[in-house]
Structures are given as C-alpha cells and as structure tokens.
Image: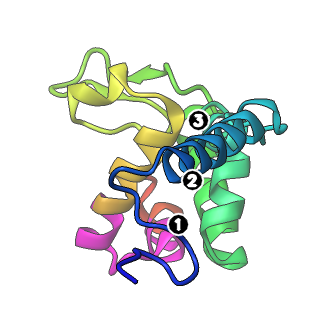
C-alpha cells in the first residue's frame, strides 16, 4: 500500500482524499473566522506616556521614584512643556529641564527616559544622588 498516512489512501489521483483535506481546511478557517478574538491591549503604553508619575512608579524602585518625583516637582512643577532659563545661555525644556532642545518635542515618558540616561552618566543612575545634589546646590 502506497499511502501518505496509515489507513488513508494517497492524495494523488484520489478525489476522496482531496475532498477530505479541503473539508478539514474549510472547518479550520470557519472556526477561526467565528471564534471570538482577544482585543489588543492598546492602553499598555498609552497609560504611561502622559502620566509620568505612573510611569516612574512602575519602572523604578520606590525610593528612587520618590527622589525623581521630588526633582520633577522642583524643576518643572510637572509641566512637561516647561521652558526655563529663558534669559540665560541655555534654554532648558520639559519635566526635568533638559538642555537638549529635542526634549521640548518629547512626551513626558520620553523626557524621563532621556533624563535617566543623563542620571546614569552623571549620578551613577541614581535619582536620589541627583536629588541630594539638588538639595545642596539648587541644580543637578
């Protein structure tokens, strides 16, 4: 017996085998068309983009998050469109008053991510080190 599967007749030349396969494919397609689909969770990142406190609290250890929240409160009063040092040599932008002008076009989450890179470079990645510096010098 020359069959593709045990007990089944070979596909070539067999109209019955072809119909069986076509029927199976049609059933699978029908089930997938009518089965309820899970909705994509579109709010997964959207809930953080314009809610910086929620983003900070969910991505940082509790003490570090507290220090960063205090910094943001002092730097911009939580206004991600804040512009500071207007008459000085460098304008600063956003939640954490970043010197990079790209920050003015960023959303709050992007500004925090950019600032975290700065903290990594300057304060060993610690928002608390930056906060302690701010308390001593009035800037970080």
123 magenta-colored: yes
Q: Is residue 113 above or below residue 9?
A: above
Q: Secondary structure at mark 2?
A: helix
Residue 1 tag number: none
**Residues under labels 2 and 3: Cα distance?**
19 Å
Residue 131 tag number: 1
Give x and y (percent) for residue 122. Answer: 26, 70
**Residues under labels 1 and 2: Cα distance?**
6 Å
User: Going from the N terminus, do you reach mark 3 or mark 1 first?
Assistant: 3
User: Coloured how?
Assistant: rainbow
User: Going from the N terminus, do you reach mark 1 or mark 2 first?
Assistant: 2
Give x and y (percent) for residue 109. Answer: 51, 41
> Residue at coordinates 42% horizontally, 40% vertically from top-left?
110
Q: Which residues are magenta?
A: 118-133
Given this view, does label 2 or label 3 mark the residue nearer the observer?
3
Residue 49 tag number: 3
Image quadrant holding the N terminus, namely: bottom left
Whether residue 48 sits left or right of residue 35 in the image: it is left
Q: Is residue 68 above or below residue 53?
A: below
Considering every residue shown, the one lying at the far front of the view is 1
Front-most of residues 86 and 48: 48
Q: Is residue 26 above or below residue 102?
A: below
Query: Mark 2 and mark 1 in contact (Cβ < 8 Å)?
Result: yes
Give x and y (percent) for residue 134. Answer: 47, 61
């Amino acid at each position: 017996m020359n069959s593709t599967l045990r007990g089944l007749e070979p596909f070539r030349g067999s109209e019955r085998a072809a119909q069986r396969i076509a029927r199976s494919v049609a059933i699978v397609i029908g089930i997938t068309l009518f089965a309820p689909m899970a909705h994509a969770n579109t709010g997964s990142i959207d809930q953080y983009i314009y809610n910086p406190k929620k983003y900070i609290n969910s991505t940082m250890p509790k003490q570090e998050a507290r220090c960063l929240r205090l910094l943001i409160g002092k730097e911009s009063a939580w206004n991600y469109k804040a512009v500071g040092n207007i008459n000085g040599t460098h304008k600063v932008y956003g939640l954490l008053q970043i010197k990079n002008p790209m920050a003015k076009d960023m959303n709050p989450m992007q500004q925090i991510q950019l600032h975290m890179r700065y903290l990594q470079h300057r304060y060993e990645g610690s928002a608390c080190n930056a906060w302690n510096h701010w308390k001593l010098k009035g800037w970080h």
